Image: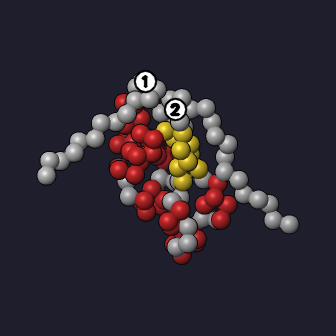
Amino acid sequence: MSQLLKTPPRPEKCQLCDRPEQLTKYHLIPRTYHSRRQFRKLFTKGDMVTRILWVCTPCHKNLHATISEKTLGLEYNSLEKLLNNVEIARFVAWIKDKPVGFKLKVNRKAK
C-alpha cells in the first residue's frame, strides 16, 4: 500500500523572514514543471509534493520577481539555497523588521 504524501504543516511564521503573517504555500519545485522530463529525472514525486515552504505574500512575490521559475526549481529548491542567494537574502533582511500587515508599494509606470 502506498503512503500518502503530505505537505509540511503550516508554521506560525514565514519560513523566510520569520514574521507572523498570513502564509501561502510556496513550492520549491514549481508545479508547472512537475510533468517535465528534466524535473522527473532529478526529483521524485515525493520531492515534488513535499518540498514546500510556508511564506508570507511579500516574500512569495519577491521570490517570483527575482528568479525565474525554472531556475528556482533547478538551483534554489531548498530553504538553504534560497537564503544563499544574495538578492533573496537582502530582501529577507530588509523585510524581517517590517510590521505585521506591511504591504509592498508597487511602482506603476505612467502610460
Q: Position of residue 71 (x, y in %)?
A: 42, 59
Name the residue beneath numbered marker 1. 99
Q: Nearer the viewer, residue 22 or 76?
A: 22
SS at mark 2? loop
SS of the residue under disc 1 = loop
Vertical comparison of 40 with 3: above or below: below
What amino acid type should be assigned to the residue bearing mark 1?
Answer: Pro
Residue 91 showing in the rendered view: yes
Q: Residues within 10 Å of mark 1 (few under 14, many from 20)?
A: few
Locate residue 34, reporting x and y percent. 55, 67
Q: Nearer the viewer, residue 10 or 109?
A: 109
Quarter-wise, where is residue 27 in the image?
Answer: bottom right
Q: Amino acid at mark 2?
A: Glu
| Residue for point 50% across, 29% down | 19
In the orientation shown, which residue stands out farthest toward the left? 111
Question: Alpha carbon of mark 1 to alpha carbon of mark 2: how far?
Answer: 9 Å
Q: Circle 2 sits on which residue?
A: 21
Q: Residue 39's x, y, as percent?
A: 54, 68
Residue beneath the point at 64% across and 54% down: 50
Residue located at (54% from left, 29% from top): 20
| Residue furthest right as drawn | 1
Q: Which residue is at a point 43% across and 59% down the rendered structure image?
A: 69
